[in-house]
Amino acid sequence: MGEAKNKARETVEEEPLSPCSRLFNSPDFNCAIIVTMGSRVKGDTPAIIHGLEHTLVNHPRFSSILEMNNGKKGKPRWVRTKVRVEEHVIVPDIDPNIENPDQYLEDYISKLTTIPMDLSKPLWEMHLLGLKTSNAESFAILKIHHSLGDGMSLMSLLLACTRKTSDPEALPTVAVQKKRFGPNCNSGFFNKIWWLFVGLWFIIRLLFNTFVDILMFALTIFFLRDTETPLLAKPGSELTPKRFIHRIISFDDVKLVKNAMKMTVNDVLLGVTQAGLSRYLSRRYDQEATPKSKESMRKIRLRSAIMINLRPNTGIEALADMMAKKSKCRWGNLFGYILLPFSVGLETDPLEYVRQAKATIDRKKNSLEAVFSMAFFKLILKVLGLKASVVLVRKVIHSTTLSFSNVVGPKEEITFHGHPLNYISPCVFGHPHALTLHFQSYANKVIISVTADPTVIPDPHKMCDDLVESLKIIKSAVLERGLYEIDV
C-alpha cells in the first residue's frame, strides 16, 4: 500500500518553491491575503462551489499541497493533488437576528488572522457568510496564503473567475497604463537629437537615484529606523489579531483631483494618505496647526516598505483561458522592496499633500531600487540561507512604519459565480507592521482598506474617517480654485 502510494506520488507533477514563496512560508514571516467580496444578493453556496470547481481549482497553485522537506535535495515543493472544493468552503451558522452585523463581520475576519492554514490541503479557503450589513446582502471571504502568488497575480486570477454584470459571458475590463518614451518613427533629425539628450539625462538620474536608494536601504538594514510614532509596530505585532476596516469613496472624486492637478491616480491616493495620516497623528499628539507643530511633525521620518511586483503581470484573459483549458501560463512570486517616504505635517494648503506625493512617486519611478533589493535578498538566500534572508526582510519592515499598496480593479461592476458584487476589499496580514493601507478601485468606487494592530492603533475607524475627510478637503480645494476639468 505504501509503495503504491509513493509510486503514484512520483507521477504527480511537482514544482519547487520560488525564493519569495519560501520567504512567505518561513515561521517568522507567515503572510496571507484576505479578500472580502460583498454581494448585492443573498448567497448561493452550491452555485459558488460549482463555479470554483470550474475555475479556481484548475489553477496549479490552488490544486497543490505544500511539502516542505520531501522534494529534491530536501527542498520545499508544490505537489499536485485532487481537490474537493467542499473541504475549502466554510459556511458558518449565523443568527439572522444578530444585533450588529457590521461588527460581526469585522470580528469574523479578525478571527481568521489567528487560525493557521491547514498544510495538508492546498493553501486557500473561502468563507460564505449569509450576513446582511450596511454594504452587502452576503459575503464571500477568500483567504489565500501569500506563497501562492503576489498580490497583483492573485487579484488578476480572482478577476478571471468573474464576469461583467452587463454581459455574463465577458471578462472584466481592467485599465492598462500606456507608456511611451522617445520619438516616433516620423520625428525629424533635430527632434531625435533632443531625445538622445533626454535619454542620457534619464540614465544619469536613474543611476544617481538608484545609488541613493541602495545606500538608504543599506542604512535601514544596519541602523536607520523610522521615528517613534503612535503608528510604529511593537515587537511581535505580526502575531497580534488584526482589525480590518474599510470605507468606500467615489472614484469620480479621485479622478476630478487627478485631472485638475494633471497627475495620476497613484499621486492622488498617496496625497490623500499623507493628509489622512497627518490628521490622525495630529489628533493622537493633540496638536493644532501652529508653526511650531508643523515643524515638529515635518521632522518625523515615516516610511512604507512597499512590495513591487517584478514579474510581468499575466492578463486575466490568459488566466481565464488557463483555468478553462487547464493550460499553463506565467505565475509565481517575484518582487522587490522600495522604501517610500511619507510627508506628514499640518499643511495650510491641502493640495500640497498631492504635490508632495507626485514628487515622491516621480522620484521613485526613476530608480532600480526594487530590482537591486530583490537581487540582494536572493543572493543572501542562496549564500546564507532562508533564516538570514528572513532576518534581513524583517529588519527592513521593522524599521519602517506601514505597508501601502494600490491595485487597479475592473472598470465595470462584475459578478462572482452569479453574485453581483458591491465591493471588493483585499488586505494582507502576517508581516511585522502595525498598519497596512490598501486602495482597490472597482467600477466607480475606490475601497480603502485599513489593517491595524489594535494594541498600537486602537481607533482604526477614525483613521478611515480621516482618509475619507482628507479626500473631501482636497476635492473642495480644487473646486474652490476653479481647477476642475471634465473627465471625458
Image (spheres, rainbow, N blue to C red):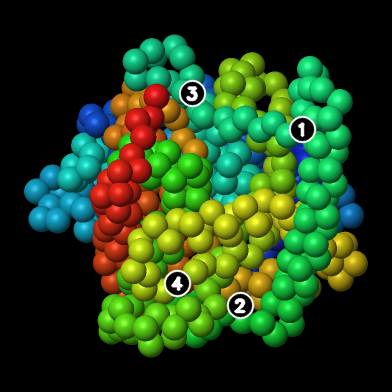
In the picture provided, is 31 more to the left or to the right than 377?
left
**Alpha carbons under labels 3 and 2: distance apart:** 38 Å
Which label sits in the foreground, 1 or 4? 1
Residue at the (86%, 34%) spot, across then down: 193
- Quarter-wise, where is residue 163 in the image? top left
Q: Secondary structure at mark 3?
A: loop
Residue position marked by numbered label 4 in the rendering: 344
Which amino acid type corresponds to the residue marked 1 in the rendered image?
Answer: Gly
Give the side of residue 65 with respect to residue 130, left or right. right
Classify residue 60 as left or right of residue 433: right
As measured in the structure, the alpha-carbon distance from the residue carrying label 4 to the one carrying label 2 is 17 Å
Q: Which residue is mark 3?
A: 173
| Amino acid type shown at disc 3 | Thr
Q: State yes or no: discs 3 and 1 in contact (Cβ < 8 Å).
A: no
Nearer-the-camera pick, 131 or 358 = 358
Q: Which of the labelled discs sits on residue 399, or is there none?
A: 2
**Nearer the N terminus, badge 4 or badge 2?**
4
Name the foreground residue: 125 vs 5.
125
**Quarter holding the C terminus?**
top left
Amino acid type shown at disc 2: Ser
**Secondary structure beneath label 2:** loop
Q: Report the Cα–Cα distance between label 3 and label 4.
A: 35 Å
The Cα–Cα distance between marks 3 and 1, rounded to whole angstroms, is 28 Å
Q: Earlier in the sequence, mark 1 or mark 2?
A: 1
Along the line of sight, the residue nearer the viewer: 291 or 407: 291
Q: Which mark is residue 226?
A: none
Q: At 35% across and 43% down in the image, what residue appears?
A: 483
User: Earlier along the polypeptide chain: callout 1 or callout 4?
Assistant: 1
Q: Amino acid at mark 4?
A: Val
Tell whether 322 sits left or right of 85. Answer: right
What residue is disc 1 on?
182
